Amino acid sequence: MTTTPNTAHSWEYEYLPYTMSGSEDSAAEIEIPNYRIFSPNDPEHYIAETNEQLPGDVQEKHARLLSTAPEMFNALEYFFNIMHDYESSLRKGYVQQAIDTARKALEKATGGAI
């Protein structure tokens, strides 16, 4: 039996920079980029965080990709499950559903349309 992809699990990310006093001026603060990946059901216990030694734009790309892991897993698992009988899955619309699910996950991971 083929079922629809499981979309119950989802992760999100948020920007939570660190602040550090500047070396020359102790009153000035330097913002150090940092992203945290978390489950919306339990945001206080984050799943991962990015490496603050990387540039902020790279960290955001990593956070987007990490936060998409559950959707990517579900899309891949669904695709794998329907491929045992490709012709039947094609007729029933499961292949198109797998493509749509994968496209949605990739769009979330890349931050735009693919």
Image: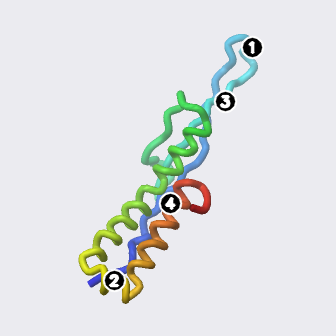
> Which amino acid is tagged 3?
Glu
Residue ID at (32%, 67%): 77
Pointer 4 residue: 106
Q: Nearer the viewer, residue 81 or 37?
A: 81
Residue 19 is left or right of residue 51, and the answer is right
C-alpha span from label 2 to label 1: 65 Å
Taking the view exactly as shown, the residue that stands out farthest to the left is 84
Q: Which is more N-terminal, label 2 or label 4?
A: 2
Verify CB contact (< 8 Å) between mark 2 and mark 1.
no
Q: Which is more N-terminal, label 4 or label 1?
A: 1
**Secondary structure of residue under mark 2:** helix
Pointer 3 residue: 31
Please rate how many residues cluster around mark 1, counting C-alpha atoms within 10 Å: few if below 14, some from 14 to 19, many from 20.
few
Taking the view exactly as shown, the residue that stands out farthest to the bottom is 91
Residue 29 x %, y %: 71, 24
> Which amino acid is tagged 4?
Leu
> Which amino acid is tagged 2?
Ser
Residue ID at (55%, 42%): 35
Residue 72 x %, y %: 42, 61
Residue ID at (24%, 76%): 84
Q: Is residue 52 above or below residue 91?
A: above
